Amino acid sequence: MINYIVKRIGIAIPTLLVLIAVSFYLMHAAPGGPFTSERPLPPQVLANIEAKYGLDQPIWRQMFSYLWGVLTEFDFGPSYKYHDRSVNEIIAQGFPITLKYGFWSFIVAVGVGIPLGAIAAIRKNTWIDYLAVGVSIGAQVLPNFVMAPLLIIVFTLWLDWLPGGGWNGGSWQYLIMPVIALSTSYMASIARITRSSMLEVLNTNYIRTAKSKGLPTKIIFFRHVLKPSLLPVISYLGPAFVGLITGSVIIDMYFSTGGMGYFFVNSAFNRDYSVMMGITIVVGGLTILFSLIADLLYAWVDPKIRY
Amino acid sequence: MNYLPKSLAVGFVLASFASASVFAAATHPVTGETLADDQTFTYSLLDEFSSADPQIVEDVSGADIVRDLFEGLMNQDADGNLVPGVATGFTTNDAKDVYTFTLRDNAMWSDGNPVTAHDFVYSWRRLADPATASPYSWFAEIMAIENVGAVLSGDASPETLGVTALDNHTLEVRLTASLPYFAAMTTHSSTFPSPEWVVRTSGNDWTKPENIVSNGAYILTEHIPNERSVRERNTLYWNNDATILDKVVGLVINDENTDLTRYLANELDKGTVPSGQYIRLKQDYPNQATSFPRLCNYYMTFNMSPSGPEAFKDVRVRHALAYAIDRSVITEKILQAGQINAFTFTPGATAGFDVPSVAFGRMTQDERNAKAVELLNEAGYGPSNPLKFEYLYNTSEGHKKIAIAAQQMWKETLGVEATLANQEWKTFLKTRGEQGFELARGAWCGDYNEASTFLDLLTTPSGYNDGKYSNAEVDQLMLDARTMSDASGNYTRIEEILANEMPVIPIYHYAGVFMLKTNVKGWPYNNVEQNVYSRNLYKIAK
């Protein structure tokens, strides 16, 4: 197990470096730069700005000095667009926000999705099953960019129950709508995966044996059905968790949460190279970390898997 | 320049009001309206602002914030007229190349230090200093301050800039050109003072709420990027007694429909009108939906450079394409928010600009269409030999609608086969800047309220002239206009030349639209630049 973890981390470092190099080059290959604007800056003004940020250097040198800053001082550089902030500050401010609503969305998605799928599987072909499947398909086909404004219209404009956006330190009133909008489609996927995998398990011979020897349904379910049915769910949860905690541009855009997602997408349009690189590295690192954790969990759930 | 008596009188009235307000329900000192207890104004920003540093800020919403936090030499009133700011007035020589500003002696920074002429010297040097790398340092260049070019290029030290503090309250500025409108330029946010001692000790962090020291009517008390910024009354502001609004909250709302929903849910005092919804909102909320002319134009530019298509070198083709666009369809059916059909490059709302009655603007659309068909035939294009070209615009639903409408009009009236292409914003700017287009979308918002801010674009040396139009007479008229006290004749003449040569197709002049609650008063509707000073706003009791 330890060997496996060390090996995976050994692979992670070059993966991250390749990710940085490729993103860096792709980003600079996009036409225009952070200071391209409708009214082109006079050459002297542009030269002064480029000199300040080192953008007048050859690309390879920019990349190495950037990497050097990241590795030695954990310094992701200044934002070219939001001049009062460094990338470290933007991430330090935006990531906890994203993490908070992402984490709660994960809890809701898992907490509602798994029971919903399980009930549907156990009560297969009853109205409960149809209702659960109907709800999860409905939730999946309703994209969050439709759901977000609908939630605001209903809960803010019509009912006047919840604030229409903002963060306010993440107090619960501000958290409810982002979490609903973000978790729904994940919840639906989890419910559907749980249902189909549980149906499969329920049809296996060892469950039939358990039933025939007269074990109570509760014991069969919790001891023999639940754990193996969760295998496909867990392999889905790893990437889903990363997806949830690394930010959603839609949530940030509609609910003005100030999370990392909007900064990320906007940095590409603004050619705000350093913000884009900083968030890419954070998201890349988290993706690698959580796919490792998901693999380890997998081994814990499935005795057939050993590293 | 004698502003003092009037402002002093207002000051007395307001000072007496301030002391009275402790005891009675507050009323407005001039209008007598009953004021609301909660003087908090909440509005929305479409995007996070770029900076709260006067010398660094580069976007309109950032400039609005900086204008509340800092005060420059001169201000604008609700009609856009020049009124005193930190300076009580100024004098200039006959050549109008030396300006002397007299600063008031009661202006203070929010930490209690006095605001002096030295603060302006520091800040203007800072604006031009290459080490600051200000994206607006070019503004110092168009202000024509002595030696600015050499300072910008690093050939001379910032200390050599032509701005001197004669004493604590007298600032002298020496220019390399005669600029009759120089004082008006000091209402621009990049000329506002920065506190040297704070910039030195806090560096890049000096604009953070915990560090910032400012001299305007408000101080920045909270700033969470992409979420909110809060500015609150600066009790040390010299004219604080006249400020009614206690608190201004700017919320970043990236989606304009959500913005409107939150406005309607009373979370905002001022909100956005999403595109295409003005007419409906005006019907439902006649006293809240507002449209006003803006100093911006929307046009199409022909590529007149050697790399441009041969067809566009023929003036008849350019005329035909410009005539065949029915502007009313675009403004009344597509945009629907009070935009103005454009037959000139410069918007009619621009100060000192008389819109010339150009020939094609006087015709009916049917006459224009008939003329367009005639001209295109003369130029040798017809059903057997249709004109083909590509129209390039930056990716956006709004531009797409206009492009499709124009494409249809050209096709139906002239049988022209225009293809449409769109590019992401920065890619588009690069393509257009390198003349990699045939016909491209363009738009321009004035930097200041004077026609030259638009017409400069079509002069040969302009860095913004992406169509590479070049006309010696236009260049000369613009050159002469710089030193004339009234250049409106030149601008009118240039617009006539443009109508004859049609290097660009003017489509419409912008309208600004927003929703404003009826209890918010003091909005400067007549200030075409929409330079809003929150300290002039107030909320009345409902």
Image (cartoon, grey):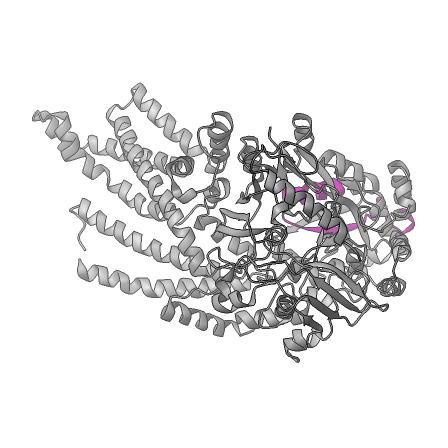
Q: Point out the image quarter for the C terminus of chain B.
A: top right
Q: Residue at x 66, y 65 (%)?
A: A41
Query: Which corner quadrant of the image does residue B270 belong to?
Result: top right
Estimate the x, y position of residue B24 in percent, counting from the top left: 58, 33
User: B71 or A227: nearer the eye?
Assistant: B71
Q: Nearer the viewer, residue A304 or B219?
A: B219
Which percent across, then down, holds residue A192? 33, 33
Count of numbered badges drawn on the protein = 0
The residue shown at (87%, 40%) is: B369
Quadrant housing residue B195: bottom right
Instruction: Identify the residue shown where x is 50% and y is 49%.
Output: B226
Range shown magenta: B377-406
B464 displayed left or right of B535: right
Give the quadrant of residue A199: top left
The residue shown at (46%, 47%) is A258
Q: Residue furthest top?
A: A127
- Residue A99 position in % (x across, y down): 36, 48
Work out whether residue A55 can be spotted.
Answer: no
Percent position of residue B204, x then y: 50, 64
Is residue B208 left or right of B157 when viewed as pictured?
left
Up the image or down, B382 lies above or below B452; here it is: above
Q: Considering depth in this image, is A291 or B7 the residue closer to the camera?
A: B7
> In the figure, is residue B254 to the left or right of B537?
left
Residue occupying the far left of the picture: A213
